[in-house]
Amino acid sequence: APPQYAFPGAAAACARTAWKPENTNVYLKCGGIFAGMTSIVSQIKVCLKMALDAGVHLVLPTIPLRDSTDLTNFNFFNGSANMDFDRWFDEAHLRDAMARACPQLKIRKIADFQGLGDASTELAAAAAAAAESGEKMAVAHEWNFDINTAPGLKLLAGYFWVGRPFRTWFEHELLRERFLSHSTPKTPAAAAAPGATIINIVSQFLVFRITDDATGRELALWNDLSAMVRFNEATRAITTKVEARIDQPYIGVHFRVEKDNIWSSYDDQLKQDLDALDKLWTRYGGAGSGAAKENKQQQQQQQGAHGLKKPLVYLACGDEEQIKGFEAAAALRGWNVTSKYDIVKNDAETLRQLKELPFDFQGAVDLGIMLKSWFFVGITGSAFSSTVANLRDSTGRYRGSSLQFPDDDHARTHLFNDGDAAAYACCL
Ligand SMILES: *[C@@H]1O[C@H](CO)[C@@H](O)[C@H](O)[C@H]1NC(C)=O
Ligand SMILES: *[C@@H]1O[C@H](CO)[C@@H](O)[C@H](O)[C@H]1NC(C)=O
């Protein structure tokens, strides 16, 4: 159980929002959430922020799990790959956090509504069970809001910001739909009549320009939303078991060379990673550095007081063949490389649990280990690397390379400019 954090950024955002009586039964049902694990988390945050900004409620989204073998198959149009929110994330944690930060915002599930369809058989079964128990809410309207109608929108480039609030566009759409359906509420009481209004909307990746807010309030909200979305206990437990077996300071490297690689080639990434390791060892590895101090007792046992031992390198990578290649090349430069598979190789039970996880959930294990690393090396073009870099920084955003700006408040992070995603800095 996490400490009872008050989520002040989210609470302040909630207090700034007008929760209008005529929107009492309006629920956002976010769709279009897919891709890699950290992109999905970012889109969940977009969904939560849309509801908070607009002062409406939330139907928890379903999310397709990508194919763990063919990583380019995101199963976007594959209903049977859809999984309910609680199969991805800790739903109780989100509900508990939101109840404290913003009790006005109601959270329901698809199965709580009558006739709210979904292609997944699992969800259909849950809906049928809820129908039997007679606790379902009627749906008065189901409307689709298309974010592409927002004037001047360019996808994946950041759009809504404090100078162009989501709420303004949303209220305009809502007013029009109500007018078209001749149900413009005359009084708040009439609007709050039984029956929900479901708004289907795409949770558009990178649509909010979080950092274009001089007050920092958007970022405070965004960082709180990061803390509301966490993985389920099974995934977290495996992360903890892997982490507990690392008995020394380590450098985390995100080696993004799996079969869906759209970034630099294997050879380029390998060379730049090894060069960075050597560079940061020259910078930080000297006597008196943090790594040297933390490592001291071990060195004394293993090598005597005068020999410095290079820290372990933990590779975040989902492809065991590629890990072996990196390991061999790194050994030539005196680096000892490990991975999640290697660390638990003598713990058959944990290894089995790890290998049974889908690719993206294995990525969640790596995410946890990267957060705890003494230094992190990744690439700007990857949402995973960029998310780790943001989470390691006390501001919640990557402030630039520690190799260039050593005054980093212990973020200890370096991202290579590789396939730069222009909107990650503002909007991820
Ligand atoms: C759809 O998803 C299911 C469940 O993940 C999977 O077994 C099936 O192969 C997928 N179908 C296609 C066409 O990818
Ligand atoms: C590399 O690190 C692993 C894990 O800490 C350790 O078991 C192994 O002995 C190390 N190998 C070398 C050559 O230092």
Image: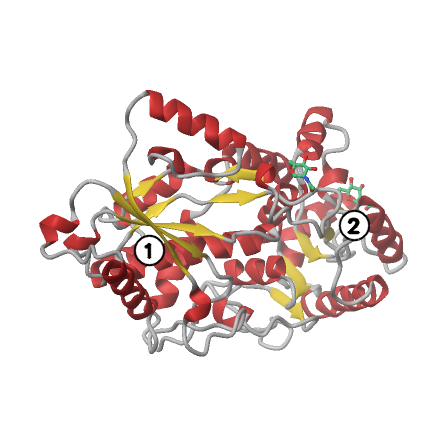
At 83% from the left and 51% from the top, the residue drawn is 322
At 64% from the left and 62% from the top, the residue drawn is 382
Q: Quarter-wise, where is residue 330 in the image?
A: bottom right
Q: In this picture, is 250 found above or below 150? A: above
Q: Quarter-wise, where is residue 16 in the image?
A: bottom left
Q: Quarter-wise, where is residue 421 in the image?
A: bottom right
Q: Amino acid at mark 2?
A: Val
Q: Amino acid at mark 1?
A: Ala
SS for dot 1: helix
Q: CA distance from mark 1 to mark 2?
A: 44 Å
Residue 270 x %, y %: 82, 62
From the image, which quarter does the N terminus lie in?
top left
Q: In this picture, is 105 found above or below 209? A: above
Tell me how many marks there are: 2
Give ligand 2's quarter of the image: top right
At 76% from the left and 29% from the top, the residue drawn is 346
**Residue 3 seen in this snapshot:** no
Q: Which residue is mark 2?
A: 337
Indicate if the residue with disc 2 has its beta carbon within 8 Å of ligand 2: yes
Neighbor class of circle 2 (other Cα within 10 Å; few <14, some 14-19, many 20+) is many
